[in-house]
Amino acid sequence: MVEKAVALRPRSTTPKTLSSLAPLLGLEQHGPDVSVTGVALASAAVQPGDLFVALRGVNRHGSEFWPDARAAGAAAVLTDREGFAALENSSVPILVASNPRALLGAVSAEIYGTRPGSVPTILGVTGTNGKTSTAFLLEAIMRGVGARTALSTTALREVNGESFASTLTTPEAPDTHAMIARAKEEGVTAVAVEISAQALDKNRMDEVICDVAGFTNLSHDHLEDFHTMDAYLDAKAVLFTAERAREAVVCVDTSWGQKLAERVTIPCTTLGRRGMSSAEWMWDIQGVRDGVTTFVLESTHGDRLELVVPLSGDHMVSNAALATLMVIRSGVSLEALGAVGPGTSGIPVFIPGRMERVSGSQGPQVFVDAGRSADAYEHTLTALRALTRGSLIMVCGTSGNRDATKRPIMGRTAAECADVVIITDDDPRREDPTVIREGLLEGARSVPGAQVHEIPNPSDAIRFAVSLAKEGDTILWSGPGSQDYRDIGGVKVPYSARGQAQQALEEAGWGLTA
């Protein structure tokens, strides 16, 4: 066994020779036969003994980075024909495939020992909005009933209570399998995973089978990748096949959920809010007090469960109901779930950057959220309206190099649901931020009587919002959530919306201890 001190990988793996991997996976082998103990897609992520995967990128081929990978300790390369042509005369141990990306899951599963059937229970959730929240709720419910857990989301990755940074909604296949292997080592019995449509499209979940896959909803987003809503649903629907999941739980409160449920061929359980749809399981809110919601979940067969969750808003309760039903379908009994019901502290969940309050007990309420779609705006603003005695002020921007057609819709929704809208910059990436703001402003200014301001600098924008607010008002800063950087021109610049909001409150005399 080989010990490795890495960020989120198993502490040890059994070395695999290239000569054993090649015939098993249909790969060509060239050069010396060596053993590998891990997989890395980027030279910066290489650990000693790794198989370095060299793929064609947008501008360069990964084979160009082989010297850096070798210096970091990579033992061999997996690449395509182009990469092989660049490396074949350098005595490098090489595995060759016509489409290496399509084999990343299989290669990683072999090296890390994570073939389906040998891993903990995996609960995967997809949808446009609510994926992160539902994944956090899945982990919290399983932990609440005594399971040892792991979590993979946009905001955070965690194994048995140890936290790791997250850079993608769903990590690349080598990182996903490495995390599952680490979870096995730690005795984890349940893993909650957030799964994006892009991840399914780009093979990131290959050789991972969810015991239960859940669907939250589908709304206008990511059309820069999928072009139409039907194609977007098709990409999500891949998760609900026998190759990806054993069982499905689908929220059918929207027409897209109903369409998905009709086409799913694996065992499928439907969920909806009482009075909104016809589903096998229904949820309904019993009461809300101080941000804590009691809700009931009932089946058409007479099963009934009452639960407590430290969240508010219909959309959050829907996420909690979905997570609960997924846990039930995974085999946890209704009796066991009494551990997070009335008379207890409830589901032990904290969801960073999702309607997260960052203000103190006095002054305006200030929340940060990661929502970057009209649907997310509507649900979050509606939930906050119910908690607000005074005015509702929204600070918002959105990402560059993404679907521009949704921006006017987002701006209009913001202006319809909030009393004041402040358009600012978020993650422009490589797009002109002025153009991004113009899309949001177009929609916001189309609402008669809307109070709309444009303040490009987000730190100035949140300070302006605080200057407008008084006791009883609420400020929502939507977009950055718990993210600790801004992507400007392709460079990740350290930035905390939480920190900026709290500093703005402090400067205005509304500190956390005020």
Image (cartoon, helix red, strand yellow):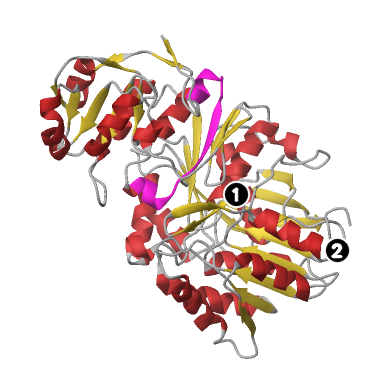
What's the distance in space between the residues labelled 2 and 1, CA to CA?
32 Å
Would residue 322 be found to the left or right of residue 111 on screen? Answer: right
Nearest to the observer: residue 325 or residue 11: 11
Residue 308, position as x, y percentages in the image: 75, 46
- Residue 59 vs 10, above or below: the answer is below
Nearest to the observer: residue 179 or residue 345: 179
Of the numbered discs in the image, which one, if any, rests on residue 509? 2
Would residue 64 be found to the left or right of residue 153 on screen? Answer: left
Q: Quadrant of residue 24?
A: top left
Label 1 Cα crowd, 10 Å radius (few <14 / some 14-19 / many 20+): many
- Residue 358 vs 27, above or below: the answer is below
Q: Which residues are magenta?
A: 182-200
Residue 84, position as x, y percentages in the image: 14, 33
Q: Residue at x 63, y 82 (%)?
A: 452
Q: Earlier in the sequence, mark 2 or mark 1?
A: 1
Q: Residue at x 73, y 45 (%)?
A: 307
Q: Is residue 116 visible?
A: yes
Residue type at numbered disc 2: Gly
- Residue 99 vs 402, above or below: the answer is above
Most extreme residue toward the top, as rendered? 1
Most extreme residue toward the bottom, as rendered? 448
Tag 2 secondary structure: loop
Residue type at numbered disc 1: Ser
Instruction: Specify whether residue 61 is painted magenta.
Output: no
The quarter in which the N terminus is drawn is top left
The residue where tag 1 is placed is 133
Q: Is residue 385 visible?
A: no
Instruction: Specify whether residue 187 is painted magenta.
Output: yes
Q: Quick check: marks 2 and 1 in contact, CB under 8 Å? A: no
Q: Quadrant of residue 335?
A: top right
Residue 4, position as x, y percentages in the image: 45, 18
The quarter in which the C terminus is drawn is bottom right
